[in-house]
């Protein structure tokens, strides 16, 4: 008897697949076939694949193979997100150049991928750290610069002292560095390059509605991240500033207009603009609250050192809360500035405070505080004894039954309410009031309706070496000048000493730093920062369509054919940053006229994590299972099939080696069975005999399995139950061995069963499938063989009759499938006319249902 030996089968097929680049190669756009672009997120070349990768790729690979077998032209590419800090850290630690380290990791991981048997089109491999790729990052950057979409500004940046670099907001997780879980992120002021993603904020929100093939949770995360708020900006005038600084409690219109000649008081802005989403509550505003860093506060504090000190404390509190990622729950503190503002709606004078819960970088950095109708303002007003004035009420008035007085229901924040104490706007519903009041403000030129976004422009400057050089020059005469296209790429120098110190390593290389201004021919300084690596991953999947193109980022005709990506598969940790940047980049490329699609990805799937002993696999927990070990012990087919069999792809998967062993035993059963009967499979033309009971059982199971898998590949993707169904099919075949021996199963039926079994197995265990396919004498490329079709009639279970009793009396007999479940029996019984009549108007107290035997209902 032959034994299943993956260690013999798998390397043999690896060699054959490697020798045939066409096998998994996409055909040209002109193939005339329908296309299918399936993509898994490209890995960072750390040097080792982990089980999370294996799972991600096993899902994509199964799908790619299934689509090939359904006649599609499939693009299934792979590449390397190859820039980034670990290469620099490794360089410092091992004294290896980052490029060398990265490329050798890529080679190692590519070997792992080929051991796993993944069906990638390596002809279109993309490696983002190579100049033939990153030159296009530079090219895109210059196109954005020309359109004002890339700009430079001094700004507070998130700084990780361990990375020695700036982090994007998205790379700060609850105040900590995404790479260093225990490193609090600091704030620093630096000149940075930004991409104007906020220009696309509205479209990025709007187009989420087009992404019906994305998980709802990812769309919600993006919507929240973009954070669109409809509201209004209202400008309050500031009352006479002079006397306010001299007297803590000035009276209205007090004092003369004599301005002291000294101090910076003349600098004081005469107005302050707030952003509010509830202009309908403006008659209830009893203070203005400014962010500690608001310019007005700086002016107020100039001549008031006490205030300056207090504001510094407020800012410190806010920064701490920000670093801890929890500004929302900050314990509120504030300080009165001594100044007053005038509410343009009622000319009322209200004090201007500084609040530690007001952020500079949202809205206008200033708010009108309405304690009666906002939680935070309420808490603040209670603490500092500020007036709380009710200006909206529930439509039905205060709930009299509960006996609550109005004070106890505060703050009252409902949207659906009526205005009171609001002058001419009294009795309006709040929504109508919002429109009328915004219009009123606009008409009188002290306000305007306004949409605000939480999304910030994307800071892409990194003071690191291993990234795409930003292709900009600084000339004393001409200022900021882009590197001309024909000088691209700006090559990243290779011989460089990398050190841990802050600042960009490139700045220490005079031959890089010193350049010639293309405008005036004079000396210029080269930008020494490199780009955030999220630039690389924002458009890499376009490059896959024509990765060798030396004249353009991609071939537009190929992109027109392949895009959008039909199915993208990856970790939910990329739900915000990578996927928002990619969507932004696509829209920019569209506006550059390069592509037609508005969105890059049609369907997105986010798989669950792989865990071991209840925790995410990690070196620090010591619970890492290496794919190489598993493959050495059980083979690649068993390892990857187990990654799909253990649970549905969206759930977290608890890795259990016993499960891999179980899948491996199942694969040996398949192997043995097919090898035993491969001769019959060759004899497809035996005389058609009348259907026997044994052949009916086999065919029914076979067609049910085909139906199950076909349905699941269509969208549900419960590959675990798909593999379980194949196991059942194999059990049925093995249980039929006596009947086969007795000649009760026609050769044609057996041959069809074997052939279909191999095809069904091919997406999950490709090595075994290719091997057995050849063993049964098939000459055709397995991937071009057609996925089996099921016959509904053959799949149908025999029907049986089941009696239905009501309170012990036989009332009806229903016809159901032999394998009908309790639910199916119950549903069929309840739909039966006689049962309906007998239970009409009564309650079913109890239902005893024995599948295949009887339904017994007790009614009252
Ligand atoms: C007055 C008001 C009354 C407000 C009311 C709310 C309820 P979202 O929805 O998140 O956009 N706000 C505005 N800018 C702020 C800043 N820089 N820091 C802290 N808070 C700020 O929130 C908008 C609301 O948050 C605004 O509407 C403002 O408070 C506050 F019954 O204005 B509101
Ligand atoms: Zn110049």
Image (cartoon, helix red, strand yellow):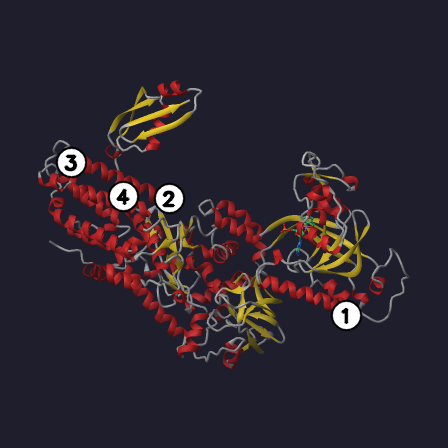
- Residue ID for mark 3: 694
Q: Is mark 3 within 8 Å of ligand 1?
A: no
- Front: mark 2 or 1: 1
At horizontal 17% and vertical 44% (from top left) the residue drawn is 734
Q: Is residue 338 left or right of residue 652?
A: right
Callout 1: few (<14), some (14-19), or many (20+) C-alpha neighbours within 10 Å?
few
Q: Earlier in the sequence, mark 1 or mark 3?
A: 1
- Residue ID for mark 2: 715
- Decide if residue 773 is in sight here: no
Callout 4: few (<14), some (14-19), or many (20+) C-alpha neighbours within 10 Å?
some
Q: CA distance from mark 4 to mark 2?
A: 17 Å
Tag shown at residue 305: 1
- Decide if residue 418 is in sight here: yes
- Residue ID for mark 4: 725
The furthest residue to the left: 742
Q: Earlier in the sequence, mark 3 or mark 2?
A: 3
Question: Image quarter for residue 818?
Answer: top left
> Are the two marked residues, 4 and 2, in contact with CB atoms closer than 8 angstroms?
no
């Amino acid at each position: 008897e032959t034994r299943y030996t993956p260690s013999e089968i798998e390397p043999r097929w690896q060699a054959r697949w490697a020798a045939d680049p066409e096998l998994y190669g996409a055909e040209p756009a002109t193939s005339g076939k329908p296309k299918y672009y399936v993509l898994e997120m490209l890995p960072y070349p750390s040097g080792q694949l982990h089980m999370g990768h294996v799972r991600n790729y096993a899902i994509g690979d199964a799908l790619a193979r299934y689509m090939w077998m359904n006649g599609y032209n499939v693009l299934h590419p792979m590449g390397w997100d190859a820039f980034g800090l670990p290469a620099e850290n490794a360089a410092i630690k091992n004294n290896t150049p980052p490029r060398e380290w990265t490329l050798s990791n890529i080679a190692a991981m590519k070997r792992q991928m080929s051991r796993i048997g993944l069906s990638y089109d390596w002809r279109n491999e993309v490696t983002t750290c190579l100049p033939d790729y990153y030159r296009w990052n530079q090219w895109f950057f210059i196109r954005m610069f020309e359109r004002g979409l890339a700009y430079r500004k001094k700004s507070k940046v998130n700084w990780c002292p361990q990375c020695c670099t700036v982090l994007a907001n998205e790379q700060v997780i609850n105040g900590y560095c995404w790479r260093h879980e225990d490193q609090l992120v600091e704030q620093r002021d630096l000149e940075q390059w930004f991409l104007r993603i906020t220009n696309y904020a509205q479209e990025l929100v709007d187009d989420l509605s087009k992404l019906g093939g994305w998980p709802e949770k990812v769309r919600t995360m993006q919507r929240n991240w973009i954070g669109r708020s409809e509201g209004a900006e209202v400008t309050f005038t500031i009352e006479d500033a002079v006397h306010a600084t001299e007297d803590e409690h000035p009276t209205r219109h007090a004092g003369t207009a004599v301005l002291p000649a000294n101090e910076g008081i003349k600098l004081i802005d005469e107005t302050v603009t707030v952003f509010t989403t509830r202009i309908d509550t403006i008659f209830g505003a009893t203070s203005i609250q400014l962010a500690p860093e608001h310019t007005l506060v700086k002016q107020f504090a100039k001549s008031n050192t006490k205030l300056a000190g207090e504001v510094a404390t407020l800012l410190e509190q806010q920064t701490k809360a920000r670093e801890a990622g929890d500004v929302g729950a900050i314990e509120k503190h504030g300080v009165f500035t001594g100044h007053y503002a005038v509410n343009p709606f009622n000319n009322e004078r209200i004090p201007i405070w500084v609040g530690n819960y007001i952020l500079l970088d949202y809205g206008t950095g200033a708010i009108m505080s309405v304690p009666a109708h906002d939680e935070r303002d309420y808490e603040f007003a209670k603490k500092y004894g500020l007036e709380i004035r009710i200006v909206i009420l529930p439509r039905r008035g205060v709930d009299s039954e509960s006996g609550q007085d109005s004070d106890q229901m505060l703050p009252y924040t409902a949207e659906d309410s009526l205005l009171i104490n609001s002058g001419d706007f009294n009795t309006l519903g709040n929504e109508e009031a919002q429109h009328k009041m915004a219009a009123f403000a606009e008409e009188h030129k002290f306000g305007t309706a306004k949409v605000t976004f939480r999304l910030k422009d994307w800071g892409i400057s990194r003071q690191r070496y291993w990234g795409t050089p930003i292709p900009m020059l600084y000339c004393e005469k001409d200022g900021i000048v882009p590197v001309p296209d024909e000088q691209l790429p700006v090559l990243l120098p290779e011989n460089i000493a990398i050190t841990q110190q802050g600042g960009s390593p490139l700045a220490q290389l005079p031959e890089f730093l010193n350049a010639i201004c293309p405008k005036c021919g004079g000396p210029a300084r080269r930008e020494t920062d490199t780009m955030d690596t999220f630039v690389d991953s924002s458009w890499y999947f376009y490059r896959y369509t024509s990765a060798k193109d030396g004249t353009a980022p991609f071939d537009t005709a190929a992109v027109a054919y392949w895009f959008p990506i039909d199915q993208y598969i990856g970790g939910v940790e990329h739900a915000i940053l990578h996927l928002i940047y990619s969507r932004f980049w696509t829209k920019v490329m569209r506006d550059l006229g390069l592509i037609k699609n508005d969105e890059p990805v049609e369907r997105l799937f986010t798989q669950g994590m792989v865990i071991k002993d209840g925790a995410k696999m990690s070196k620090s927990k010591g619970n890492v299972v290496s794919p190489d070990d598993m493959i050495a012990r059980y083979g690649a087919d068993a390892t990857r099939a187990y990654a799909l069999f253990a649970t549905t792809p969206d759930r977290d998967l608890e890795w259990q080696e016993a499960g891999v062993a179980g899948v491996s035993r199942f694969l040996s059963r398949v192997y043995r069975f097919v090898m035993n009967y491969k001769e019959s499979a060759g004899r497809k033309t035996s005389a058609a005999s009348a259907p026997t009971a044994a052949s009916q059982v086999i065919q029914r199971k076979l067609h049910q399995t085909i139906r199950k898998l076909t349905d699941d590949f269509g969208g549900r993707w419960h590959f675990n139950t798909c593999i379980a169904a194949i196991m059942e099919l194999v059990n049925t075949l093995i249980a039929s061995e006596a009947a086969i021996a007795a000649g009760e199963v026609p050769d044609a039926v057996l041959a069809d069963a074997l052939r279909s079994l191999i095809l069904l197995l091919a997406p999950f265990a490709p090595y075994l499938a290719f091997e057995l396919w050849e063993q049964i004498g098939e000459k055709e490329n397995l991937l071009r063989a057609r996925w089996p079709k099921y016959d509904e009639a053959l799949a149908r279970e025999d029907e049986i009759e089941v009696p239905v009793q009501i309170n012990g009396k036989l009332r009806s007999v229903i016809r159901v499938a032999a394998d009908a479940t309790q639910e199916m029996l119950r549903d069929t019984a309840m739909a039966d006319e006689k049962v309906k009549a007998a239970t009409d108007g009564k309650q079913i107290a109890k239902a005893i249902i024995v599948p295949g035997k009887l339904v017994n209902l007790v009614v009252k």
